[in-house]
Amino acid sequence: MNSAGKAQPTSGPMIIIAAPSGAGKSSFVERICREMPVLVDTVTYTTRAMRAGESEGQPYHFVTREDFERKISEGFFVEWAHVHTNMYGTPLHQLVDAWRDGKVIIMDVDVQGAATFKAKYPSAVSIFILPPSIEELRRRVTKRDGGAPRDLDVRMKNAEREIALAPGFDHRIINDEFESSYSRFKKLVESIIQGG
Ligand code: 5GP
């Protein structure tokens, strides 16, 4: 980039969203990105198998474990973690590109990712989405996956561990009824962006 070009910020606005799998986090993030064009969702990388209805780039870049490990050694990821039995990682270039374009990044990550991003970017604001109860979470995951997934008990144990970390987040939203919870979530994101 020459001196006439735009300076490339190394850091910018970021909102971190975490929740146990099935709490409704992806629906919140997908919808708010459609409704607020200033927000950019990252397309992270994973070693997990595609689910029905998913494709390359939606919602992840699907790679082999070998590719993923090579990318780690090349310093491609600003953050990566083992989640359940797979690996997930966020490429640094997506953050740099979004900030260069004046966007606000909204990250959908697990609790380890949330902690890493908070440590690397202390001005990031974190939100934890809670299910109304573990029983309701179990019911939603079973419905979403078209039956109880083989690792349902592991996921529910992980969910309890993750929920125990909710008090450490800047904000918490309980997703009991989607429309009203989403509307509280959107108001919160708007106030974060306005610096309130
Ligand atoms: P799923 O496989 O159900 O789509 O996602 C499992 C978990 O991985 C979710 O909590 C999701 O937010 C998290 N996740 C997705 N991408 C990343 C990432 O790049 N880093 C981390 N730490 N977690 C991620």
Image (cartoon, rainbow, N blue to C red):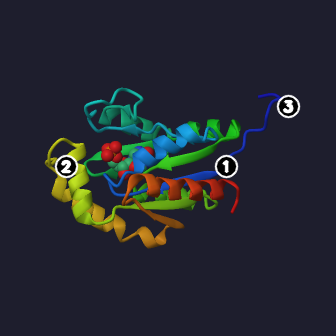
Name the residue that disc number 1 marks.
11
Give the number of the disc on residue 142.
2
Q: Residue at x 35, y 31 (%)?
A: 63
Q: Residues within 10 Å of mark 1 (few under 14, many from 20)?
A: some
Q: Is 185 rendered above or below residue 42? A: below
- Residue at image mark 3: 3
In the image shown, does 149 or 190 lie closer to the viewer?
190
Q: Measure the C-alpha gap from mark 1 to mark 3.
A: 20 Å
Dot 2 or dot 3, earlier in sequence: 3
Sequence-first tag of 1 and 3 = 3
Q: Residue at x 31, y 32 (%)?
A: 64
- Between the residue at mark 2 and the residue at mark 3, the CA separation in whole angstroms equals 55 Å
Most foreground residue, 136 or 10:
136
Helix, strand or loop under label 1? loop
- Mark 1, mark 3: which one is toward the viewer? 1
Does 162 sit above or below residue 193?
Answer: below
Q: Quadrant of residue 57?
A: top left
The three-letter code of the residue at mark 1 reads: Ser
Q: Nearer the viewer, residue 68 or 155?
A: 155
For image coordinates 53% across by 44% down, the residue present is 32
Determine whether the residue tagged by mark 2 lies in a helix, strand or loop. helix
Disc on the earlier residue, 2 or 1 = 1
Q: How busy is the neighbourhood of tag 3: few (under 14 within 10 Å), some, or many (20 plus)? A: few
Tell me the element at label 3: loop
Of the two numbered discs 2 and 1 in the rendering, the one whose residue sits closer to the viewer: 2
Location of residue 122 (image quadrant): bottom right
- The location of residue 43, given as percent across then percent down, is 47, 36
- Say whether mark 1 is within 8 Å of ligand 1: no
Instruction: Identify which amino acid the numbered label 3 is placed on.
Output: Ser
Q: Amino acid at mark 2?
A: Thr
Q: Is residue 81 visible?
A: no
